[in-house]
């Protein structure tokens, strides 16, 4: 019986289809999804003075990244940066956004890769999409002079699709 298990083919990574998204945050032609990671964590905000009044300013995300089998594969933090356990890392800059389908959630984003380090799944990533967001918005109130520099964490989840040039 054991011999029959040894003859099974090695499992290959499943091809992931891009999500259905508005045109403004579509991946570019010639790119394919190389990784889908589910993020679960917080968006961290600080109460800061603005031109007119105090307001919540995004400091950084802080989230675990999980694969489709719910295994932790990396983290997402200030930059914005995504780092995988394989040692690869990508930092990006948002280039477009659309409102989330959930009005109480942070926007969906298209992020362009700016820098890379390490070698692994993120090495050739050129574009990242943040979609299917839930939560993550700062509170509507509670930021004034008496709360200057107070930080809060707003729980969120999102799917991140990482794209690289098609092979």
Image (cartoon, helix red, strand yellow):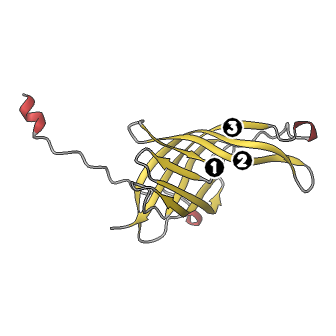
Q: Which residue is mark 1?
A: 78
Quarter of the image with the C terminus is bottom left
For mark 3, give the secondary structure.
strand
Residue at coordinates 74% horizontally, 36% vertically from top-left? 152
Q: Between residues 55 and 79, which one lies in front from this camera angle?
A: 79
Residue at coordinates 42% horizontally, 42% vertically from top-left? 67
For mark 1, give the secondary structure.
loop
Relative vertical location of residue 161 with respect to residue 114 in this rendering, above or below:
above
**Residue 10 place in picture, x, y as percent:** 19, 45
For mark 2, give the secondary structure.
strand
Q: Between residues 47 and 104, which one lies in front from this camera angle?
A: 47
Calculate the distance from the C-alpha at mark 2 to the C-alpha at mark 1.
7 Å
Q: Left of 20 or right of it: where is 24?
A: right
Residue at coordinates 66% horizontally, 48% vertically from top-left? 106
Dot 1: within a 10 Å radius of its alpha carbon, few (fewer than 14), some, or many (20 or more) residues? some
Q: Which residue is mark 3?
A: 154
Q: Which residue is mark 2?
A: 59
Q: Left of 64 or right of it: where is 101?
A: right
Mark 3 vs mark 1: in front: 1
Q: Residue 43 got which mark?
A: none
Indicate which disc, 3 or 1, sits on the residue closer to the N terminus. 1
| Most distant residue in the top direction | 1
**Residue 149 place in picture, x, y as percent:** 83, 41
Q: Are marks 3 and 1 in contact (CB under 8 Å)?
A: no
Q: Are marks 2 and 1 in contact (CB under 8 Å)?
A: yes
- Residue 141 occupies which quadrant of the picture? top right
- Residue 136 occupies which quadrant of the picture? top right
Indicate which disc, 2 or 1, sits on the residue closer to the N terminus. 2
**Residue 98 place in picture, x, y as percent:** 64, 58
């Amino acid at each position: 019986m054991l011999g029959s298990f040894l003859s099974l083919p090695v499992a290959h990574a499943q091809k992931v289809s891009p999500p259905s998204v508005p045109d403004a945050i579509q991946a570019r032609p010639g790119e394919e999804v190389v990784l889908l990671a589910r993020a679960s964590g917080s968006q961290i905000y600080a109460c800061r003075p603005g031109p007119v009044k105090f307001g919540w300013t995004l400091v950084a995300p802080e989230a675990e990244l999980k694969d489709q089998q719910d295994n932790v594969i990396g983290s997402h933090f200030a930059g914005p940066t995504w780092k995988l356990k394989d040692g690869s890392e990508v930092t990006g800059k948002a280039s477009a956004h659309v409102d989330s389908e959930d009005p109480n959630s942070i926007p969906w984003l298209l992020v362009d890769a700016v820098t890379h380090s390490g070698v692994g799944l993120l090495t050739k990533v050129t574009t990242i999409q943040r979609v299917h967001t839930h939560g993550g918005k700062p509170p509507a109130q509670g930021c004034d002079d008496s709360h200057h520099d107070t930080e809060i964490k707003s729980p969120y989840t999102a799917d991140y699709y990482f794209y690289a040039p098609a092979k």
